[in-house]
Image (cartoon, helix red, strand yellow):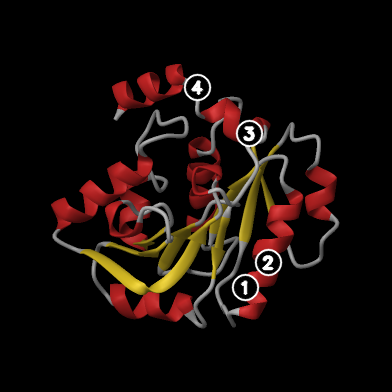
Amino acid sequence: MVVPSRGRPENAERLAQAFIDTQTEADLYFIIDNDDPKWNEYAKNENIKCLPADNKTGGCAASLNTGAIYLLDFTQFPLYDYFVFLGDDHLPRTQNWDKAFIQALGINTGIVYGNDLLQGENLPTAFGMSRDLVTQLQGMTFPGCIHLFFDNFVKQLGIDLNYLKYLPDVIIEHLHPVAGKAEMDEGYARVNQPKWYEEDLLTL
């Protein structure tokens, strides 16, 4: 599980606890910007594995791709057959949801996603991906992405591959301000500037 995060160690702690509560067996890695002033707050939690990212973009896509590339290195990490992206504002609610993702993907090249109670089937705001795709992409989203539209990219990729699986009964709740489930903090305000929509759309 690859989770880019910046300035939200409390979200990381909440997500780590959700893994325990849902009996999730997958390894959980938080990708933290080198210059995050709250780095030490992440690192002091024994339930949190942290990997660094030299990310100056302000968005999470570069950190996501950095983390995925780290974890492809089977000389340093286990040989993972499946990769999952979660935001630090996602919260799994379904028991053994990671096993449901694995079962849905099987040996196929493709994408799987659950119900975030916000976008639902419309967009994979959190998603699983087969290892071969991560290898080909050298990450989990498109090159040049800063923060936005990579869920659109991933959905279209799954459609193009003819292997996009939506699991409506697997709940991975998106605790986002749009849903009224989080405060509009500095991070949300930063990545939702109009210029970012324009820049990411141009690179998509």
Q: Earlier in the sequence, mark 3 or mark 4?
A: 3
The Cα–Cα distance between marks 1 and 3, rounded to whole angstroms, is 24 Å
Q: Nearer the viewer, mark 4 or mark 2?
A: 4
Quarter of the rendering occupied by the C terminus: top left
Residue farthest to the top, as pictured: 195
Q: Is residue 70 above or below residue 45?
A: above
Q: Residue at x 82, y 61 (%)?
A: 45
Q: Tell me, for residue 19, which label it has, or none.
A: 1
Residue 187's disc number:
3
| Upstream in sequence: badge 2 or badge 3 | 2
Q: Are marks 1 and 3 in contact (CB under 8 Å)?
A: no
Mark 4, secondary structure of its residue: loop
Mark 3, Cα crowd under 10 Å, few <14 / some 14-19 / many 20+, is some
Disc 1 packing (10 Å; few <14; some 14–19; many ≥20): many
- Please report whichever mark, 1 or 4, sits nearer to the chain's N-terminal start: 1
Q: Report the Cα–Cα distance between label 2 and label 3.
A: 20 Å
Q: Earlier in the sequence, mark 4 or mark 2?
A: 2
Circle 2 or circle 3, nearest the eye? 3
Of residue 20 and residue 49, the one placed in the foreground of this image is 20
Residue at which label 4 appears: 193
Amino acid on which disc 4 is placed: Gln
Direction from residue 109 to residue 37 in the image, left or right: right
The residue shown at (75%, 50%) is: 9
Q: Nearer the viewer, residue 59 or 67?
A: 59
- Residue 3 image position (x, y, % from top left): 57, 53
Q: Tag 1: residue type? A: Phe
The residues tagged by marks 1 and 2 sit, at their Cα atoms, a distance apart of 5 Å
Indicate which label's residue lies in the foreground, 1 or 4.
4
